[in-house]
Image: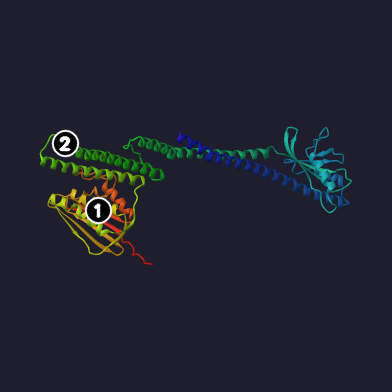
Amino acid sequence: MAMKRITKRWLLNSFGVILIILLAIEIAAAVGIRGFYYNSVSSAIKSRASVMSGSLVRYSEDITVDYQAEVRNLVENFEDKEKMELMAIDGAGNVILTSSGFEPKSKIDMPDYEDAKAKASSATFTGAAAPGEFIGKLGSEKVMAITMISPVKDSEFAALRFVVSLSKVDKQIYEMIGIITLVVVGIICFVGFSSSYFINSIVIPVGDIGKTAKKIAQGDFETRLEKKNDDEIGDLCEVINYMASELAASEKMKNDFISSVSHELRTPLTAIKGWGETLMDSSDKDTIEKGMRVILKETDRLSTMVEELLDFSRMQSGRLTLMLDRIDIIAELGEAYLMFTQRAMREGMTITYDEPEDFIPVLGDKNRLRQVFINIIDNAIKYSDSGDVIAIKVYKDGAMVHIIISDTGCGIKAQDLPMVKSKFYKGNSTRRGSGIGLAVADEIIKMHSGTLELISEEGMGTTVEISLPIAAKKTEE
């Protein structure tokens, strides 16, 4: 339907306009050609009549010349009789002499003669009367007739009438119009051919793009468009293909995320359920204490995961907010470090913190920033093994404070590194975690006008650098 609508719109808006313009041009050309030819014939007749009018004046002024005989001689021996007919008209409006030698048997209608008389009667004594002109049918033949009132008064010959057949002129006009019509038809055919190319090269591909986009919307992320031309349509095909690839990758990450979260939830729930059943049937104090420690630990894991999911939901909906205040970033980082010292010890790792003595103020949300530090340190421990080292350093650089948390753990694969901050992404499936903590941490740091960058090499460890703007000094009133 979309293709049909575009085609119909193009036919109406483009082809229709072109057709109207061409028809207007043809009509204007036909009128112009007719006017040119008819004006040429009229000018030729009027020029001949002017010459003859001058001759009549000379004859009337020469007393040695028989005026009536000369006029009769002019008419009977008219040199252009093959092209036009010359008629002599008396004062009563009767044709008394013709260059063809055939006089009409009855009085004929001569609108040009009446027109010439009217012009002669209204002419001033200083001005010459304009000839009368008529274009129309004379019997079955189309003619142009021009009548010139005789400049000699009180003569037997009151006017001279020139009559020209327009058959050949009209034939030439029709030939010219025919040529123009052929040109117009050729242009229309060319436009039709180009329209066919337009439909094949644009409208049909747009229809294919629509069908492919519909398949993608229905979940078929494997469908692809073929790029046939290096133009805007080709670029659109590439964008659609890229969109399909990104949606496929996002769908895979989402499915992996759901699978990972399900697994992460199932593990602590299984542990809690198992120890709960064990404690119900046990009265041993050591067993009860061990079971309670496991239950509390797994409950904390569940609580952390739920908080991550809630934060991710807030981030997606734009409801992740900050409670900004002037805080000491060193104090918040120190608290996060202390939370993991015992755990690192238990797992055989070394965690060091080179804590600066300076107070470094930052305008931020202390709970959210602490959450970021906890997430980064937790990841460092999570992706490290016994004997590895986690180091925390802080330094100032102008108006920025840089927090570097590095480990000597398993590192990140080169192909996974650009994606680790993406939602749902989890590069190493052998380690626990939902895969959204780093995405939330990156968003929190961005909301603080800072940056979170990762440098990692597989088997060599990972370094996370957090950069935050230092708060300006307070001004006292």
Residue 199 pos. (x, y %): 45, 38
Question: Going from the N terminus, do you reach mark 1 or mark 2 first?
Answer: 2
Q: Nearer the viewer, residue 345 or 130?
A: 345
Residue 280 pos. (x, y %): 15, 35
**Residue at which label 2 appears:** 274
Q: Is residue 434 visible in the rendered structure shown here?
A: no
Other residues around mark 1 within 10 Å, as few (<14) / some (14–19) / many (≥20): many
Q: Nearer the viewer, residue 150 or 364?
A: 364
Residue 33 pos. (x, y %): 65, 43
Q: Secondary structure at mark 2?
A: helix
How many numbered badges does the structure rendering display? 2
Left of 159 or right of it: where is 253? Answer: left
**Residue at which label 1 appears:** 373
Looking at the rendered structure, the kind of residue marked 1 is Phe
**In the drawing, what numbered circle is on residue 404?**
none
Residue 205 vs 372, above or below: the answer is above
The residue mark sitting in front, 1 or 2, is 2
Q: Secondary structure at mark 1?
A: helix
